[in-house]
Structure formats: structure tokens, C-alpha cells
């Protein structure tokens, strides 16, 4: 029995304006990946410039036209690409693409609901995201080019339309796009929270929720609390740009002329921006960590180690993320005592993060690990989370951060801990739930090839950046070949860029696997990974409502893998017990 | 029929939580802006005129509107729909009085050289206009919900058991009242 009967089989309502969470999830995935691919190509292009500054790549001119006249990237276009790459990757791929895809797919399926609390708001959330994506891409083609003030869009470059070419129409469209994006994010988060708290099936207590759902819940809470603050920052910026206010501006000279702005401060923008900006790191990361928890347990055929500690650590990370924003601003003339406070709160995050890493490793320890591509990417996430986390200890400490602030050390750190961890989690999720999304299996060999080339390239790109940073090479510079003190860094930059190009080709393998498998992959069985959670009890074919007949009741936590009785035999004859299986006599529920 | 019941059940379970979480977002939006005022004042941006009396009048008006709406809800629960209609109408009228009073407040500020934008404005004066305008922008949403409640009351869509829409609307309206009281105190003790 489907709970929804109207004209949902029409093409328009089935594929375009669908209110079915599964279809919306696919819409987020495709749009997010498309944006991500564009962002990846952008990074490859500016890596060509950084690896071989001033060298002509005539073939690129075919693609980029006047942006790459004579095959050499123009400096202002370089800045635009750096800005757009950061914006697209952080917001469009890793925020909306990741959360939008997996929160939509898994929340109703794993908690036992027929759909989200509001299918209509959910649909709106996707379409706002789509429109904001289109506007962001259009901003590449306006006079003056796209926004060029960096993805953090600090004023005054972003506040004065006449500051640099990218401060004009491109910046305006950036703000319009992000305002719409924030609306999309808020609508989505509202729905996720209410659905999880109110629409769980019978027996699905909070301590029987899969860790994916806990991660999506905390992510959504971070979103509804932090994105409005970014909206307020953007609103003040729009006022300064268009209506002559002075929230962020004071004593500005352009071309020898004093501008009519007094009393404002660009530091105010930094406070507001980073109040979102740091929780944003966890908005990007937590879903990936939740996905990893699920996959690590399923693929090692062991219960997750420290279920409650995992929930507690995510809550702690979520809470702490709101009181650490000052570590992005150690160089703004902050009172050293305040700097010490932010250092302390920042370093505290290492504790729950370490708990998570410890629990992943102990879950994998002595597990009967199935090295599927999803498992590989999950283990890859654990690796990058550790590597990037360790350098976070350096950047979170004001005394150390000051030395490497705004250098490639920072680029290396956040790309590994946030970018790679999140995208590895996303890839893991796609490989794992592809059968649920498309009813077909992806090719494992191509998946393995994708993983190994990606992780080698990723470390090849971002690990050496730490050494560049320690040597003082600043981020965002068009070229470092003008500075004699960086002459001995040329080879490292070339090395990085070679891996960046290779990484692009590695993603083509994934794209081929994804598209081919969606249409021609082998048909998926109902429960290909022998998982315990509710999504594997739904039929392979999709219909709005998820379950024929009643929604199944839940009787146990989601991590009953390899559970044996007193004789050492599997309780059900299989090495997993679905959540729908009632507890046996005297059997204890694992989550309690 | 089953489909309609299912949708009704979902609506019943989720309408209020959806509103509460939306309210949390709005709170953070205004918290961001009022924090920005405090940070800005570190640069010495204060106003040197008293707050307009109109803002004080607005405060009493919006509190009165909350009371009248609340009495309307109590009337619906008791089945006194005539009184409920009257209360909602009074609330609607008071909401427009509130907006008029805010307008008078802005006029007073303008005439005393406190401008929203331009070279004679400061970040504090701009914040004052911006925060009050944003409150009104949110109030418009509340007025739309009041109108919906009013028309539904006239079409006898509510009963003594079924008044979820009124509860959602009144929660938002009380929140708007509380938000204004917060902003008023903030203006009185922080900006002025």
C-alpha cells in the first residue's frame, strides 16, 4: 500500500517536482556531483598555473577562451577560480550534496517513516539549491568575472563593488546565490530534525537509531543554528555594497579618494562569518563520520565499538564547534587572553575526535573485514581524519598558528581533514547505498581502482603543502615564482600539480562506473551487504511510501553483527540480526 | 481516506516542531545581528538621542495584541467562536497599529538626524533601522497567518477539538511579541 496516490507517476512529478525523499536524494546527488566536478576541474586548471607558472597550455584555451589567453591563465581569472572552487566544494558539494543526498535517502528509510515531515518543503529545499547552483555558475560569465575575494569573501574586497573586477556583478550574484542556498539548507534541516524526532517507527528509540541518523540530526541542528548567522552577515554586506551603510567599512581609500564610510569594521564580518564557518566544518564532516560508522560496522561484521560514546562525541563536537570560531582570527589583533580561550576550546575538540577515531579502529580490529570500495573509502576517511586532525592541533594553537597562518599549511590541513574526509565519506556512502538508490550494483574493481588512485593522489597533492606552508609560501598567490626565497619550492609545486591532474582522471573512472552501473549494472538484491538497518527491508523497486503494508517495528539496536549464543553459534544462523528481529528470551539489547 | 488520515496525522505530529525549529533559526538570525551591534560598539558607534516614544507605544501595542489573540484561542477552546473572531480582528488591527507606530518612530529618528544610510549615518543608526525593519518583515508572516486564521474562523473550519492552525499561528505571534520586547530593551540599554 502506498501512502500517496495522486499523479506521482507523471514524469513531471516523478522526476522533476517529486516530493518523494528518495528521488530528492538522487536530485541532490546528481546536482552536487555536477557542481563538485566543475569545482574539481577549476582546481586542476589553477594547479596548472601554480605547478608551471606562466607556461602555455594551449589546449586549455579551447575550454577557457579568454580566461586562458595564449594558454596562460590571467591573474584575475586565477583569483576567481580559487574563490569559486572553494565556494562550490564547501557549500554545493560537501554541504548540500552530501547532507542533501544521504539525509534525504536515509532518514525516512532508517527510522521507519514513509517520507519526510513535509515532502513539499523538501522539494522546495532541492529547488532552492538548484537555483542557487545555477546562479553561482552564471556568476562566472558576468562582466568583471566571478567573485574573487576568496571563498570567505572578506570585506572590503567583497563590500566595495569597485574594489577589484570580481567585486562587481560576480560578487552580487555570489551573495544572491548564497542567500538562496541558505534558505534551501534551512528548509532541509528543519525537515530532517522534525522527521527524526517525530516520525520514528514503533520501537525505534533514540538509542536504537543508526549512527548515520544521529550524525544527520546533529548536522541539521548545527545548520539551523549557524546558517542564519551567515545570512545576517550577508545581509549587512549587501547593505554596505548597495545602500551605503558602513557596517564593515571605515576609512577606505580607493585611487587616492576617501570613500564615504566611517565607523564600521571588517573584523565584524569575520566574527559573523566564522560563527557559521566553524560549525560548517562539522556540517560537512559529521554526515561523513556517520556514514563511516555504519559502513565500518557492517563491513567488519562487528558491532560498532562505543555506540553511546560515538553519540556523545558527536554532541560534544557539535557543541564545541560554536565556541571556537576565534581560531580563524588569531591574526586580527585579538586580545591574547581571548586567543588563549579559543586555543583551549579548539584543542578540546581533539578529545571527542580521538574518541571517534579510537572507536573506528577498535571496531575494525579483528573484524572479518569485507574490503568493498565503501569500506576502503571509510578506512580512507579514518586515515585523513587522523592526518588532518593532527595538523589541526598546530593551527588551533595561537602561538603556532601565527607562524603558518594564511600559508599552504592551512590549505593542506583543511583539505585533508575536511575536504578529503567528507568526500571520502560521500564516496563511501554512494558505493554502499548505490543498490538502494538505483537498484543496481556498482563495479567493485573500478571502485577499488578509484579508491587507490584517489587516496594516493590526495596525499600526493595535500601532504607536501604542509612543507610549503612551513617554508612560508602564502596561499592564494597567483604565482610564487616572483619570490627568490621560494625558488626551491618550484619542484614541490610541480609534484603537487601532477597529482592534481591524475586525481581528475581518477574521478572519471568513478563517473563512468556510476553512470554505467546506474543503467547497466547487475540487479541488486534486497540486502546486498547483509545489513541490519531498516532500509534493507524495503523492496528494491522504489515507490512513494517505502513499505508495502505496515511499517516494520524495531526490536533491537542496529549493530547486532556476529552475535553468538552461549554455544558460540550465530543466534539466527547468519552473522547479522536485522533490527526487526525480536529479542530472544534473556537477550540484551546492544545499545543499552 | 486512509491517505488523508495519514497526512493529517503527520501534520498533527510535525506542525508545531517545525515552527519551533524555524523560531530557533530566527532567534539565531537576530542574535547574530544584535551581537554584531555589540561588536561594532567596540569602535565607539553609539547614538546620542533618546529612543523614540513611539517604540515604547509599540511595545504596549504588541503585548496587547498577544493578549487579545490568546483570549481568542481560549474562546475557541470554549466554543465561543463569535468572541474568537472579534479577538483575532482586534489582533489584526493592533498589528497594523504596531507598524504605524514603528513608522512614527522612524520619522522621529529621521527628524533628529539619525539616518539609516548615507554619510551622516553610523553603524548604530543603520542597525536601529535594520533591526526594526527586519522585525516587521517577520511580522508580515505573522499577519498572513492571522488572516488565514481569521478567514478560517469565518468559514467555521475550527472546532473545540480542532484548532492546530490557531495554535501554530499564536505561537509565532507570541514569539514576535517576545522578539520585539527583546529588541526594545536592547535598543534602550545597549544602542542608546
Image (tube, coloured by chain):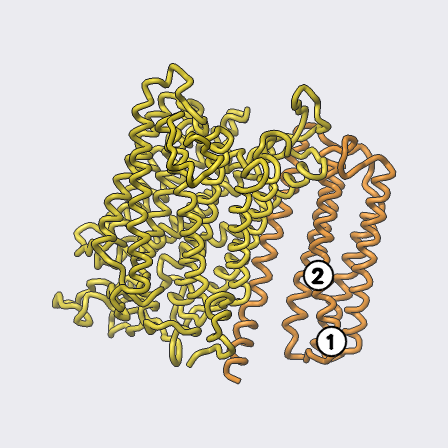
Chain colours: A yellow, B orange
Neighbours of disc 2 within 10 Å: few (<14), some (14-19), many (20+): many
Mark-to-mark CA distance, 2 and 1: 16 Å
- Compared across the picture, whether A126 is left or right of B16 comes to left
From what the image shows, is residue A514 above or below residue A356? Answer: below
Give the residue drawn at x 35%, y 61%: A210
Residue that carries the numbered disc 2 in the rendered image: B142
In the image, farthest residue toward the top: A484
Give the residue drawn at x 41%, y 56%: A29
Residue A68, percent from left and from top: 45, 33
Viewer can see residue B129: yes
Residue that carries the numbered disc 1 in the rendered image: B153
- Compared across the picture, whether A148 is left or right of A492 comes to right
- Compared across the picture, whether A193 is left or right of A265 comes to left
From what the image shows, is residue A419 above or below residue A521? Answer: above
Residue A272, percent from left and from top: 57, 39
Give the residue drawn at x 64%, y 77%: B162
Q: Provide the chain ID for the residue under circle 2.
A: B
Element at label 2:
helix
Q: Which quadrant: the C terminus of chain B?
A: top right
Mark 2 or mark 1, earlier in chain? 2
Residue A17, percent from left and from top: 51, 66
Residue A579 is drawn in which quadrant?
bottom left
Amino acid at each position: 500500500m502506498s501512502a500517496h496516490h495522486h499523479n506521482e507517476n507523471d514524469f513531471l512529478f516523478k522526476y522533476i517536482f517529486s516530493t518523494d525523499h528518495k528521488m530528492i536524494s538522487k536530485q541532490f546527488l546528481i546536482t552536487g556531483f555536477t557542481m563538485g566536478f566543475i569545482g574539481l576541474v577549476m582546481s586542476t586548471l589553477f594547479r596548472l598555473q601554480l605547478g608551471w607558472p606562466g607556461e602555455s597550455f594551449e589546449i586549455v584555451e579551447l575550454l577557457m577562451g579568454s580566461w586562458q589567453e595564449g594558454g596562460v591563465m590571467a591573474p584575475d581569472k586565477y583569483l576567481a577560480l580559487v574563490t569559486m572552487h572553494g565556494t562550490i566544494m564547501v557549500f554545493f558539494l560537501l554541504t548540500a550534496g552530501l547532507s542533501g543526498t544521504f539525509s534525504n535517502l536515509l532518514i525516512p528509510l532508517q527510522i521507519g517513516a514513509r517520507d519526510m515531515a513535509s515532502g513539499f518543503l523538501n522539494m522546495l529545499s532541492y529547488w532552492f539549491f538548484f537555483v542557487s547552483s545555477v546562479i553561482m555558475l552564471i556568476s562566472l560569465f558576468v562582466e568583471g568575472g566571478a567573485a574573487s575575494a576568496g571563498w570567505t569573501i572578506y570585506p572590503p574586497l567583497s563590500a566595495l563593488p569597485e574594489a577589484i573586477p570580481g567585486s562587481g556583478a560576480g560578487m552580487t550574484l555570489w551573495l544572491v546565490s548564497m542567500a538562496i542556498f541558505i534558505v534551501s539548507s534551512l528548509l532541509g534541516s528543519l525537515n530532517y530534525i522534525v522527521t527524526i524526532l517525530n516520525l520514528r517507527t514503533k520501537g525505534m528509540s533514540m538509542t536504537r537509531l543508526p549512527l548515520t541518523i544521529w550524525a544527520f540530526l546533529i548536522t541539521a541542528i548545527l545548520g539551523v543554528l549557524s546558517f542564519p548567522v551567515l545570512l545576517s552577515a550577508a545581509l549587512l554586506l549587501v547593505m554596505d555594497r548597495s545602500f551605503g551603510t558602513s557596517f564593515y567599512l571605515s576609512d577606505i581609500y580607493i585611487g587616492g579618494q576617501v570613500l564615504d564610510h566611517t565607523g564600521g569594521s571588517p573584523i565584524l564580518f569575520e566574527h559573523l562569518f566564522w560563527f557559521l564557518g566553524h560549525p560548517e566544518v562539522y556540517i560537512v564532516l559529521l554526515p561523513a563520520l556517520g556514514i563511516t560508522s555504519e559502513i565500518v560496522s557492517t563491513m567488519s561484521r562487528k558491532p560498532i565499538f562505543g555506540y553511546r560514546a560515538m553519540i556523545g562525541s558527536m554532541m560534544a563536537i557539535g557543541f564545541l564547534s560554536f565556541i571556537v570560531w576565534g581560531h580563524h582570527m588569531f591574526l586580527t589583533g585579538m586580545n591574547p587572553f581571548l586567543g588563549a580561550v579559543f586555543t583551549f576550546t579548539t584543542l578540546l575538540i581533539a578529545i571527542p575526535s580521538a574518541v571517534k577515531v579510537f572507536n573506528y579502529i577498535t571496531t575494525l580490529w579483528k573484524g572479518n573485514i569485507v574490503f568493498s570500495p565503501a569500506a576502503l573509502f571509510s578506512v580512507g576517511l579514518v586515515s585523513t581524519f587522523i592526518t588532518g586532525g593532527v595538523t589541526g592541533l598546530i593551527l588551533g594553537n595561537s602561538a603556532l598558528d601565527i607562524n603558518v597562518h594564511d600559508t599552504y599549511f592551512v590549505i593542506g590541513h583543511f583539505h585533508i581533514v575536511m575536504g578529503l574526509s567528507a568526500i571520502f565519506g560521500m564516496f563511501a556512502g554512494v558505493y554502499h547505498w548505490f543498490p538502494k538508490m538505483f537498484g543496481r550494483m556498482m563495479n567493485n574493481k573500478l571502485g577499488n581502482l578509484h579508491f587507490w588512485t584517489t587516496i594516493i593522489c590526495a596525499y600526493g597533492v595535500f601532504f607536501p603543502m604542509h612543507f610549503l606552508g612551513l617554508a612560508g609560501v602564502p596561499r592564494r598567490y597567483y604565482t610564487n615564482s616572483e619570490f627568490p626565497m621560494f625558488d626551491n619550492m618550484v619542484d614541490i609545486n610541480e609534484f603537487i600539480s601532477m597529482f592534481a591532474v591524475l586525481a581528475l582522471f581518477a574521478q572519471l573512472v568513478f563517473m563512468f562506473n556510476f553512470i554505467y552501473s546506474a543503467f547497466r549494472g547487475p540487479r541488486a538484491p534486497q540486502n546486498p551487504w547483509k545489513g541490519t538497518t531498516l532500509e534493507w527491508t524495503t523492496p528494491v523497486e522504489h515507490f512513494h511510501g517505502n513499505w508495502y503494508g505496515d511499517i516494520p517495528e524495531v526490536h533491537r539496536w542496529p549493530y547486532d553483527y556476529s552475535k553468538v549464543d552461549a554455544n558460540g553459534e550465530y543466534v539466527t544462523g547468519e552473522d547479522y540480526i536485522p533490527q526487526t528481529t525480536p529479542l530472544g528470551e534473556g537477550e540484551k539489547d546492544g545499545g543499552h | 481516506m486512509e491517505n488523508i488520515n495519514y497526512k493529517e496525522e503527520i501534520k498533527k505530529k510535525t506542525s508545531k516542531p517545525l515552527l519551533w525549529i524555524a523560531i530557533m533559526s530566527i532567534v539565531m538570525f537576530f542574535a547574530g545581528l544584535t551581537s554584531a551591534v555589540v561588536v561594532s560598539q567596540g569602535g565607539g558607534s553609539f547614538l546620542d538621542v533618546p529612543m523614540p516614544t513611539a517604540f515604547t507605544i509599540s511595545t504596549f501595542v504588541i503585548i496587547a495584541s498577544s493578549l487579545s489573540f490568546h483570549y481568542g484561542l481560549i474562546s475557541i477552546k470554549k466554543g465561543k467562536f463569535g468572541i474568537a473572531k472579534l479577538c483575532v480582528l482586534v489582533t489584526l488591527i493592533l498589528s497594523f497599529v504596531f507598524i504605524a507606530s514603528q513608522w512614527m518612530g522612524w520619522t522621529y529618528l529621521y527628524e533628529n538626524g539619525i539616518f539609516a544610510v548615507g554619510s551622516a549615518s553610523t553603524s548604530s543608526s543603520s542597525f536601529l533601522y535594520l533591526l526594526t525593519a527586519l522585525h516587521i518583515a517577520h511580522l508580515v508572516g505573522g499577519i498572513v497567518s492571522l488572516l488565514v486564521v481569521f478567514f478560517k474562523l469565518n468559514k467555521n473550519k475550527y472546532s473545540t477539538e480542532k484548532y492546530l492552525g490557531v495554535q501554530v499561528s499564536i505561537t509565532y505571534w507570541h514569539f514576535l511579541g517576545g522578539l520585539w520586547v527583546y529588541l526594545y530593551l536592547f535598543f534602550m540599554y545597549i544602542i542608546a
